[in-house]
Structure formats: structure tokens, C-alpha cells
Image (cartoon, rainbow, N blue to C red):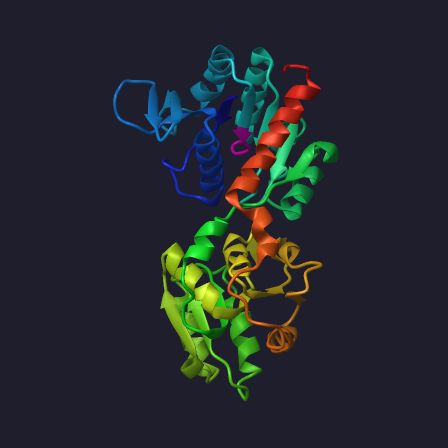
Amino acid sequence: MRIAFVSYETVFHRDTETNRRLQSILEFLADRGHDVHCFCTQFWDGHLDRLERDGITYRGVSVGPEARHSFHLRLPFVLATARPDIVHAGAEPPTQVLAARAGATLARAPLVVEWYGDGGVDDGRWTRLAAGGPDRIVTPSELVATWVRERGADGAVVDTVPNPIDVDRIRDVPPGNAVDVIYARRLDDGANLESLLLGLAELRDRNWSATVVGDGPERAAYEQLATDLRIDDRLSFAGELSLEERIAAYRGAHVFAQTAEHCVFPTEMLWALASGCVGVVEYHTDSSAHELVEGWDRGFRTTSEEELAEAILAAGDLEHREYDETFAEYDEGAVTDRYLERYRRLRDDQGLW
């Protein structure tokens, strides 16, 4: 299958959650042997308008990130000449969705839009026009799906496909040191680590240990808060760790706590839950983390520091695990299959195969 991805900006331009998500899809499909092309602004040196890398063909529609106007003008015709079976476009900027729609129409191919929603979904005119055009919209969570429907998308064409994890990799990493509670995130102004620290302070008369994974501009403030709460002797700040180091830490931990106020998909929490952790989530309206634990017997949803402390206590009664097969459906292979299934269904519905 020839799949044409459209992304004005790629992970090679800027490392963001949205761009990493799209790059993962490109790589998974290329690994399956599909003919994968990414139409983007040129990020490589030289005069050639294409670059072959790791089984993916990157095609420079325009040169330089400031060349947005020429990108949109040229994209429909470049897509049409590529004769793709599927056009799969990122939602940012929304104007590129409209250009991709024109190119998909010329190529007689269905249009899928990847709407990740990192940074929210605005309510502008171009966003609403983009929401009404695709044959299928893919979001990482019900939270983002709701945002997109509120911008005018037909609910019947909106699907949720989660971020993937590598289940085999989890099984291959030996468990790390035992710890009762673990937290992992960049320690910036959105981390909301104070909720966990206040919850743990409620349990200072209990015997527990906790680890915070991650670094960032608010780390010193959080370390000071732990000292002020008199829990710093049982709380360690591990800093940034590699993925394998984090997996080892999760396999050794009992509870993973998620308290961030904004999260379109809790990828790090998913790694931890698949590594056997019990999930304790503080609910926030702009976070989808609670979706992973709803209806699951090893998950707790809380709304206050007191409830968070109670959930951590209750989690102590559950068995310790180093792997949970419940989350095998989030494996890279299973997620790739979900994309391929949607592509084939769209082609069948349009009578193109």
C-alpha cells in the first residue's frame, strides 16, 4: 500500500508529542513493508527534493519552515502525481488539512487526519473547516475526540487510537529496586507534582517510599516542598532516565501516580501500567489519564489529595506485578493493525480496491 503522509513540520524540525506520534506511525508502517512517503518542508541540506531514510521517503514540498504558503499551494498537485492509496495528514496547521483534502480528491484517495491535540484544539475558522473535511479523524483519546467533535467533526468519522508501547521490551527489562509509589514526567509548571507530595504527606505516619522520575525547571521547588512537608527522607528524585531505566523502575514499583493537569494521552503511565503498576490518577478536565483506569480493577480515580492518599493505601492491598497482559492491546503491532484496518475499510467503502 502506498501511504502519503502530510506534515508541514516533522520530528526532524521540532521534537513535540504530535510530531513523535506521527513519526512512530510512519516507522511502523514502513517496517511492515508499505510504501511510505512523508510530504513536508525540507529539513535536509542540498538541492534534492527527496530523502530516503529508514525505508521512508521524505519529499520536500517547500524549503524552510517559513514557506507555508507555497507548501499549501503545491501540496495538492504533488500528492496527485504520487498516486497514493491513502492520504494521512496531521491536523496542525489546519490549513494543511484543506490542502491535503484537495490533493486526496485529485488522487482519488481517502483522507485520514491525525488530530493529536497536544496544546489543545482551537475554535478558529480554519480548524472548523478542517474538522469537516476528512473521511476519518484519528485521535489519541476520548478527550481529544470530544474537542474535535465540538469543533464540528462528524462523530461517526472520529476514532481513538492510543499511543503504542513495546510489550516485548517491557518483558526483556529486569525489574529495578522495589518502591511503593513512582511518578514520572517533566517537572515544569504543568506537572502538578504537589498533589502527590501533599497526598504522601497525609501518610507520613505510614511506612512508604517514593521515586520521582524526570527533571525540569520546577524540580528545585518540588524538592523544597518535599523538605517542607517532612517527607524528603522517603522520597528520591531520580532525574531523567532512559526508557529502559524507566521500565526497570516501573517493574519494581507498586503504584504509578498521575497528577498532571493536561495530558492528551498518558504514554508514560501506559508503560508503567503494562509493567505491572497499579494506577492512581487525579482527575482533571484537560487530561485523558483517567480513561486508562476506568473499569479496571487495578486503577483508582481521585479528585483530591485526601482521596489520592486513600487510593495509595488501598492499592497496597493489591498484589505486586511486574507485567500486566491487560495492556497487550496497546502493543506497537496491535496499534499498527488498527491503522491498516481503517485504511482498508476506507478504500473498500469508496470502491477503490
Residue 310 visible to an observer of this rendering = yes
Residue 53 located left or right of residue 209: left
Secondary structure predominantly adopted by residues drawn in magenta = loop
Q: Quadrant of the C terminus?
A: top right
Instruction: Name the residue located 60 percent from the left edge and 24 percent from the top edge.
Output: 111
Q: Is residue 119 above or below residue 270?
A: above
Given the current orientation, which residue lies at the most extreme left position?
Answer: 46
Residue 116 visible to an observer of this rendering = no
Q: Is residue 52 magenta?
A: no
Q: Is residue 297 above or below residue 344?
A: below
Instruction: Name the residue located 45 percent from the left edge and 41 percent from the top edge.
Output: 20
Instruction: Name the residue located 61 percent from the left edge and 55 percent from the top edge.
Output: 326
The image quadrant of residue 247 is bottom left
Q: Which residues are magenta?
A: 89-93
Residue 222 image point, x, y percent:
43, 71
Residue 202 image point, x, y percent:
58, 82
Q: Is residue 103 above or below residue 36?
A: above
Residue 168 located left or right of residue 136: left
